Image: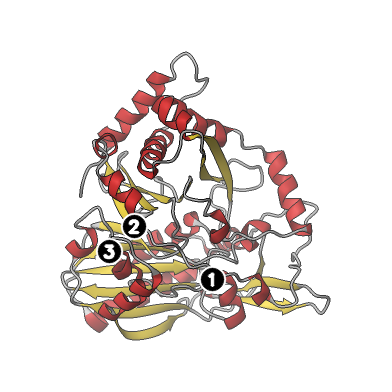
Amino acid sequence: MGMNMEEAGGAAGTVRTVSRRLVRPSIGDAPPPEDIHLTPWDLRLISVDYIQKGLLLPAPPAGGDRLVGTLASSLARALRRYYHLAGRLAVEERGDGAVNVRLRCTGEGAELVHATAHGVAVADIAGSVYTPSSVVWALFPLNGVLGADAAVDSLPVLSAQVTELADGVFVGVSLNHSVGDGFVFWELFNTWSEINRGGGGAIRDLSEISARVHRRWFTDASPVPIPLPFSKLQHVVRRFDPPIMQECFFTFSAASVKELKARANDEMAGTATATISSLQALLAHLWRAVSRARRLPPGQETSYTLAVGCRGRVSGIPPGYMGNALVPAKASGTVGEVLGKGLGWTAWQLNRAVASFDEEAMREWLESWTREPQFRYFGSLMSGGAALITGSSPWFDVFGNDFGWGKPAAVRSGREGKMDGKATVYQGPERGGSMSLEVCISPDAMERLVADEEFMDAVRHG
């Protein structure tokens, strides 16, 4: 049941584009155009795909042009608040073998695509743990576009695709990762849905929003803007063909997550010096199951990399910071240790990796980055099928995105960053502690994972 890029492209034929438009921020007391300089956290992600997440919604009362017109209007109001997302990345060639990249808040607009896929039903997308990736990927705009491509070709940094299905609607959003992270992505999505369902989402203090949008965090020693050591920005681009893999979506009830957390903490009672979190216990459960499914030798080194948010964790980065604010935390062990020492020990390795966050070391890394920039390439993260990497957060409000005609039935992601070992975590549909994992591994390993009774016992289907 694996798929490759050629198959994904072929399935796009089930999705027909009806129209495209640029949506500009609604007029009002919007701030004047301004440039936002990008930090090392922003710039290191200019080499990766757009963030692509989308929601499967019930069928609205009215479809077609009326639906898309209403969504365009509410998006324009949301962009009045987050007007930088209607801007464009711009490249300045300095003439000294380096370039600067900045986000120009020109208000040129975000893209809104209207599409139809009348042969695709809600159950085709969310009716099984197996994700029909080739169909789902076609529900997103700007597939295969990297952050740097948008700067070179002056593409929108935000694009949304509204696809009418046989019995529902899919709203897929793509956000340039050098402009913002998952926090920024879901804040925009939450605002858009709130305004569309008639909430007062846009009626807040725009001067406060303006300050939050423009406040980027640099270390004292950092040059602003940061020069990138390329004569042309295109030189940062590397493209990778992802290996054939299978994608599955697993949901764990609040009770199941609570049980995993209790088990992990019980196993480490008297040893652990801090409480293992629900997320750490769940990811440990996945790490152990995937290690079994991959049939790796006991002596093989395996790792799990988590994205740790810096909002509220680093002085100078407020909770509402609108740039990228993530650092990686990596836990490692042998396959024999992960499988033999139990859920608690494995979860404790993840707990210690997160706890090892060092603000001083992070500042040193940021300062060294300005001298020797290093960019993220998903191809280099493929470590022979022994690693896992998790992004996103179960704390983002996914299922509160009611656009006015019903709550989401499911969340899915596009092709962005898909590789063997990618596991994206989401708020579960029950909210209140349920969580979902979107997992990509090789087809043979996935077949064994889905048949793994210990893993699947904790999964709530649907």
Would residue 61 be found to the left or right of residue 7 on screen?
Answer: left
What SS does tag 1 mark? loop
* Mark closer to the observer (1, 3): 3
Q: Which residue is mark 2?
A: 246
Mark 2: amino acid? Gln
Is residue 215 visible in this depiction of the protein? yes
- Circles 2 and 3 in contact, beta carbons < 8 Å: no
Quadrant housing residue 135: bottom left
| Residue 409 percent coordinates (x, y) | 23, 57
| Mark sitting earlier along the chain (1/3) | 3
The quarter of the rendered structure image containing the N terminus is bottom left
Residue in front for this viewpoint, 400 or 352: 352
Mark 1: amino acid? Leu
* Mark closer to the observer (1, 2): 2
In the image, is residue 140 above or below residue 307? below
| Residue 67 percent coordinates (x, y) | 26, 77
Q: Alpha carbon of mark 2 to alpha carbon of mark 3: how far?
A: 9 Å
- Circles 1 and 2 in contact, beta carbons < 8 Å: no
Q: Alpha carbon of mark 1 to alpha carbon of mark 3: how far?
A: 23 Å
Q: Which residue is mark 3?
A: 132
Mark 3: amino acid? Pro
Residue in front for this viewpoint, 199 or 193: 193
Please name the residue shown 40% across and 20% down the image: 267
Q: Alpha carbon of mark 1 to alpha carbon of mark 2: how far?
A: 23 Å
Residue closest to the far right? 96
| Mark sitting earlier along the chain (2/3) | 3
What SS does tag 3 mark? loop
Q: Which residue is mark 1?
A: 146
